[in-house]
């Protein structure tokens, strides 16, 4: 930790504090102490309250301040504060409070729960068919691979116990819960390109109370190319690589462990978003039927994708969507065939996503065809039990795919509609965090007139 005082400026590492009526303790990765201050974070001036929203790792340590008998009131005399701040920093270095500050409530011990399937396992054939088949053929294999990877991370083992623990013990268990897998096959120049999309959660829950602590979604995408059209067994082998690949960027377990290592579970009062409804309009249902897409599977996967995008872009707590839940419980089926139900909290904010329809057209030029695909949707966020509406806006995405006449390129129309919708979910989530006028002009039905609603959601996310 490096603290330097220059006039009215206190500089801690790469964080510069302009109003020196505060002293902030910074660990090697996070800021652990913050009073009222005007701060500059990576070149941007902001109030401490804003920094708390933008950088959740800010934690107020008033107990330490009170213990040392320091007065950090905003109206305190600068000279007194500066001298006491210097003594405070000396105390931290001399007595090792820095290491103590690295173990706040959100770093309490965790218990390894293993690999599990989230949602109604009876619907595994359209949620995660290949992984479920692998688990049936090799019981315990997936959990064994994940456990082995945990054991190879000594820093993580300082927080994460691999013991079985007690069902009555008040401790947070963490599981790698598979939400869905999606396989798309494209034929390009005589080759078959397999695109695999895997989605899972870092799920924290309390076994004693059967209650969820937090859920942090993650997604991984990778591709494989084959000379002949893959069979079901070929696809299962490709999906198995998502768990056994030596490339961390293409290994779901490596991705999950990386996210777990940086996750700090929030305890106490937490407000949650939840994707409460995904509705497909009749016009869009016709397209799904023509493509042979299972309606319920599509609704569930769309909810999961939106959940993952919002969690990633906004970094907000989200109640996980769980298809087939009963009594507001999420079913987990572990790799060893054990099952439990996790109680889901009532959402503080409800998200509804309406898929309004799809449209396609093709234009032709001298050397190529251009296929145009559009997905249309409406996003609504409300406060349950009230008439409060934060946003209710129509949005859309348009994709242009060029196919040279000289090449053998074949795309399934539904795959392109689905890809357009995925792009819309990603871009929409990004805009809810930082709305851009140009994007609104191109993708919102009301164009820039929709911006106030987007800004209202941005404030909502900051307050969570």
Image (tube, grey):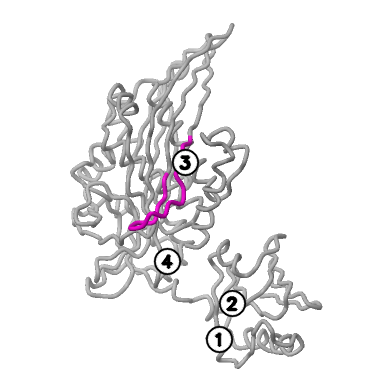
> Is 43 left or right of 70, judged from the image as shown?
right
Nearer the N terminus, badge 3 or badge 4?
Answer: 4
Report the residue at 34% width, 53% height from top. Answer: 320
Nearer the camera: disc 3 or disc 1: 3
Does the residue at mark 1 contact the one at mark 2 (Cβ under 8 Å)?
A: yes
Q: Label 2's element?
A: loop
- Distance from disc 4 to disc 1, alpha carbons, whole Å, reads 22 Å
Q: Nearer the viewer, residue 237 or 205?
A: 205
What range is drawn magenta here? 380-395
Nearer the N terminus, badge 1 or badge 2?
Answer: 2
Q: Which residue is mark 1?
A: 64
> Is 84 left or right of 119, judged from the image as shown?
right
Q: Which residue is mark 4?
A: 265
Nearer the N terminus, badge 4 or badge 1?
Answer: 1
Judged from this view, the residue extending furthest toward the right is 7
Q: Position of residue 59 (x, y in %)?
A: 54, 73
Q: Position of residue 393 (x, y in %)?
A: 47, 41
Nearer the N terminus, badge 2 or badge 4?
Answer: 2
- Numbered badge on residue 370: none
Does the residue at mark 4 contact the one at mark 1 (Cβ under 8 Å)?
A: no
- Distance from disc 3 to disc 1, alpha carbons, whole Å, reads 47 Å
Q: Which residue is mark 2?
A: 33
Q: Label 4's element?
A: loop
Q: Which residue is mark 3?
A: 393
Judged from this view, the residue extending furthest toward the front is 387
- Distance from disc 3 to disc 4, alpha carbons, whole Å, reads 32 Å
């Amino acid at each position: 930790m490096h603290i330097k005082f220059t006039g009215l400026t206190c500089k801690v590492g790469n964080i510069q504090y302009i109003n020196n009526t505060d002293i902030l303790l910074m660990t090697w990765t996070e800021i652990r102490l913050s009073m009222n201050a005007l701060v500059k974070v990576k070149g941007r001036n902001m109030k401490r309250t804003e920094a708390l929203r933008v950088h959740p790792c800010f934690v107020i340590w008033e107990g330490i301040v009170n213990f040392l008998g320091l007065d950090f009131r905003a109206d305190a005399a600068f000279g007194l504060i500066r001298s006491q701040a210097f003594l405070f920093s000396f105390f931290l270095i001399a007595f090792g409070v820095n290491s103590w500050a690295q173990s706040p409530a959100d770093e309490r011990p965790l218990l390894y729960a293993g690999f599990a399937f989230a949602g109604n396992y009876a619907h595994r054939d359209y949620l995660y068919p290949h992984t479920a088949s692998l688990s049936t053929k090799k019981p315990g294999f997936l959990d064994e691979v994940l456990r082995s990877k945990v054991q190879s991370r000594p820093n993580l083992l300082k927080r994460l116990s691999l013991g079985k623990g007690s069902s009555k013990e008040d401790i947070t268990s963490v599981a790698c819960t598979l939400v869905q897998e999606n396989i798309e096959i494209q034929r390009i120049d005589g080759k078959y390109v397999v695109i695999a999309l895997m989605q899972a959660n870092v799920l924290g829950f309390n076994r004693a109370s059967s209650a969820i602590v937090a859920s942090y979604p993650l997604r991984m995408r990778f591709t494989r190319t084959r000379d002949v059209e893959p069979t079901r067994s070929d696809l299962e082998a490709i999906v198995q690589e998502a768990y056994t690949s030596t490339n961390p960027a293409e290994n779901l377990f490596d991705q999950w462990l990386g996210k777990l290592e940086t996750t700090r579970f929030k305890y106490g009062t937490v407000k949650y978003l939840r994707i409460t409804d995904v509705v497909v309009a009749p016009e869009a249902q016709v397209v799904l039927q023509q493509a042979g897409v299972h309606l319920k599977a599509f609704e569930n996967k769309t909810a999961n994708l939106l959940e993952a995008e919002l969690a990633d872009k906004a970094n907000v707590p989200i109640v996980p969507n769980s298809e087939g839940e009963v009594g507001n419980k999420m079913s987990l089926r572990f790799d060893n065939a054990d099952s439990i139900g996790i109680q889901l909290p009532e959402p503080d904010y409800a998200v509804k996503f309406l898929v309004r329809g799809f449209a396609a057209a093709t234009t032709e030029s001298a050397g190529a065809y251009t296929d145009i695909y559009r997905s249309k949707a409406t996003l609504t966020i409300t406060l349950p039990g009230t008439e409060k509406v934060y946003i209710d806006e129509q949005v859309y995405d348009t994709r242009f795919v060029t196919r040279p006449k000289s090449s053998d390129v074949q795309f399934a129309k539904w795959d392109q509609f689905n890809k357009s919708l995925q792009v819309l979910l990603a871009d929409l989530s990004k805009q809810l965090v930082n709305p851009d006028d140009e994007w609104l002009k191109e993708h919102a039905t009301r164009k820039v007139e929709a911006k106030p609603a987007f800004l209202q959601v941005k404030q909502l996310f900051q307050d969570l």
